[in-house]
Structures are given as structure tokens and as C-alpha cells.
């Protein structure tokens, strides 16, 4: 009896924490669905709510569609049963570090104007789909080396306002089947370690500042595996060496992004 009591008490506390956390998220966001209103009971007990789904009485999916500036409330990290998180916003300058608590995530899709990728993504050991897109701004967003910890990842997409070089740790994602780096200022060479991704079936590097040619190991993999679809258009890959400045390519990229 005591065991059942404590189990029930713990479950009640978890549900209380969850709806209180969701209330805090709602208070901290603007432009969200009109059905997102604060509750004093579990959101999973009140019927269908737009852009939200539940599994076993816990919130497992939310689509945060808002026009916030600043940051998403830190209480987002208390929704620990989330399996799928989609975020679309206007000027989200900061992603709370508490997002690292969402260890059950299998899907993370972010489309904002300026939100950098937090290093806490390294805690998403179950993640299978990662897509991050930001608008081009003077503040360049980079893909952190922690991406290499996502060993269950199948799909990796980074587009638009990304810059810097690709981390070699991408080569550790041995279950990856889809890789896209596009419409961005990502530069430098394609990491040779990508040739280790033997499960890839679709690989795209287009409209970037990537240079230095396709690594020999990767070329050999492409030639030996006809099932891989590769797109390497509108880069500087025809350059044998990478230069620190590609004025023509950068001009074309800038004009293209204005029209995109």
C-alpha cells in the first residue's frame, strides 16, 4: 500500500510540475495559438489543444509558433516527456540551456531568425531528426561539435544563416541517412570523416561557401555506392585550395538570400 501511495504521489507531482511549466511557457510567449491558455490541471486532460499532443497522460509534442523576441522561457526544459519539439519564431536570440533536460526528444525542428544552436543538444541521445534554420543576420550561427553525440540521428539539416566550418564530429553519426547543408555561409572543406557515414542515401551541399574539392574518401564512397544521391551545386568545390575570401561567391550568396 505504501508503495502504491508514493507512486501515485510522485505521478501527481510530475503532472503538477508539467502543467505549471506549460503555464510559464504560455506566459512567456506571444502570438501563440489561442487554445494555449493557462490551466490548473494537466493539459492532457482537457481535450485536443492546437499544436500539442499527449502520450500516456504527458505532453509529448508541442509546436511553439510565436512571434517572440528574446528567449523561450526556461520552464520549457521541465516538459521532460517531450518526444517532438518544433519551434518557429521571429527573434529568438537565446535557447534556454534547460532544453538539455529534454532527453526523450527524437525530433527537434527549429526555424527562427537568429537562434544559435546550444551545446546542450549533446544530451539528446535518442534524437533521430535534427533540423535548424535561421535567417541570415550579421550574427553567424555555427553547428557545435556536440552534434557528434547524437548517435541515433538519421536526418541532419542546417540551412540559411549558418556559418563557420562543419565539425568533423559529423563523421560519428554512423546511422545518418539524410544530410543537407544549404543556403548558408558554411565554409571550409567538407570533413573527410563524412565518408564514414555508410548509411547515407541523400547528401546535399548546395549554395554554401564550402570549398577545396570533394575529399577523395568521399568521392570513392559516392562512386562505389550508386544508391547515394549527392548534390554539390553552387559551392566553391572546384577550388583545389580554400581561400579566406570568395568575393564573387559571397556576393551571389547574399543576393540569392535576399530573393529566397
Image (cartoon, rainbow, N blue to C red):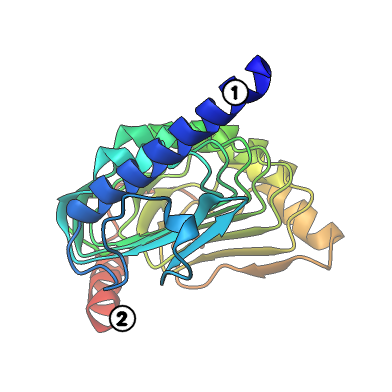
Are there few (<14), some (14-19), or many (20+) residues within 10 Å of tag 1?
few
Where residue 48 sits: x, y (%)? 47, 71
Where residue 232 sits: x, y (%)? 56, 67
| Rendered view: 50 above or below 192 | below
Q: Earlier in the sequence, mark 1 or mark 2?
A: 1
Tell which of 92 and 137 is nearer to you: 92
Quarter where residue 148 is shown? top right
Q: Quadrant of the C terminus?
A: bottom left
Tell which of 69 and 165 is nearer to you: 69
Where residue 231 sits: x, y (%)? 60, 70
- Secondary structure category for the residue under label 1: helix
Tell me how many marks there are: 2
Q: Is residue 214 left or right of residue 95?
A: right
Q: Is residue 177 left or right of residue 74?
A: right
Look at the numbered discs 1 and 2 and tell me whether their residues touch, using CB distance below 8 Å: no
Quarter where residue 258 is shown? bottom left
Please name which of the two marks, 1 or 2, marks the residue nearer to the observer.
Answer: 1
| Rendered view: 3 above or below 155 | above
Q: Is residue 145 visible?
A: no
Q: Is residue 247 visible?
A: yes
- Secondary structure category for the residue under label 2: loop
Q: Quadrant of the N terminus?
A: top right
Point 25% across, 55% down: residue = 26
Residue 260: assigned label: 2
Tell which of 47 and 89 is nearer to you: 47
Mark 1, residue position: 5
Q: Residue furthest bottom?
A: 259
Q: Is residue 104 left or right of residue 118?
A: right
Point 29% across, 43% down: residue = 95
Where residue 8 sits: x, y (%)? 57, 30
Amino acid at each position: 500500500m505504501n508503495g502504491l501511495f508514493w507512486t501515485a504521489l510522485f505521478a501527481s507531482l510530475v503532472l503538477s510540475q508539467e502543467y505549471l511549466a506549460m503555464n510559464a511557457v504560455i506566459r512567456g510567449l506571444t502570438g501563440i495559438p489561442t487554445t494555449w491558455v493557462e490551466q490548473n490541471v494537466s493539459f492532457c486532460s482537457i481535450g485536443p489543444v492546437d499544436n500539442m499532443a499527449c502520450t500516456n497522460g504527458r505532453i509529448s509534442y508541442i509546436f511553439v509558433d510565436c512571434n517572440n523576441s528574446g528567449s523561450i522561457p526556461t520552464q520549457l526544459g521541465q516538459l521532460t516527456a517531450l518526444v517532438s519539439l518544433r519551434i518557429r519564431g521571429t527573434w529568438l536570440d537565446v535557447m534556454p540551456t534547460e532544453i538539455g533536460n529534454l532527453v526523450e526528444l527524437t525530433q527537434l525542428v527549429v526555424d527562427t531568425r537568429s537562434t544559435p544552436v546550444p551545446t546542450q543538444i549533446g544530451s539528446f541521445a535518442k534524437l533521430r531528426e535534427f533540423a535548424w534554420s535561421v535567417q541570415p543576420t550579421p550574427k553567424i550561427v555555427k553547428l557545435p561539435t556536440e552534434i557528434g553525440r547524437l548517435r541515433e540521428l538519421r536526418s541532419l539539416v542546417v540551412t540559411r544563416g549558418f556559418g563557420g566550418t562543419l565539425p568533423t564530429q559529423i563523421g560519428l553519426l554512423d546511422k545518418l541517412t539524410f544530410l543537407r547543408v544549404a543556403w548558408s555561409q558554411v565554409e571550409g572543406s567538407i570533413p573527410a570523416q563524412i565518408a564514414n557515414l555508410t548509411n547515407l542515401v541523400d547528401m546535399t551541399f548546395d549554395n554554401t561557401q564550402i570549398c577545396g574539392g570533394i575529399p577523395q574518401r568521399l568521392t570513392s564512397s559516392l562512386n562505389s555506392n550508386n544508391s547515394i544521391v549527392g548534390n554539390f551545386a553552387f559551392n566553391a568545390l572546384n577550388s583545389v585550395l580554400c581561400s579566406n575570401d570568395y568575393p564573387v561567391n559571397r556576393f551571389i550568396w547574399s543576393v540569392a538570400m535576399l530573393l529566397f
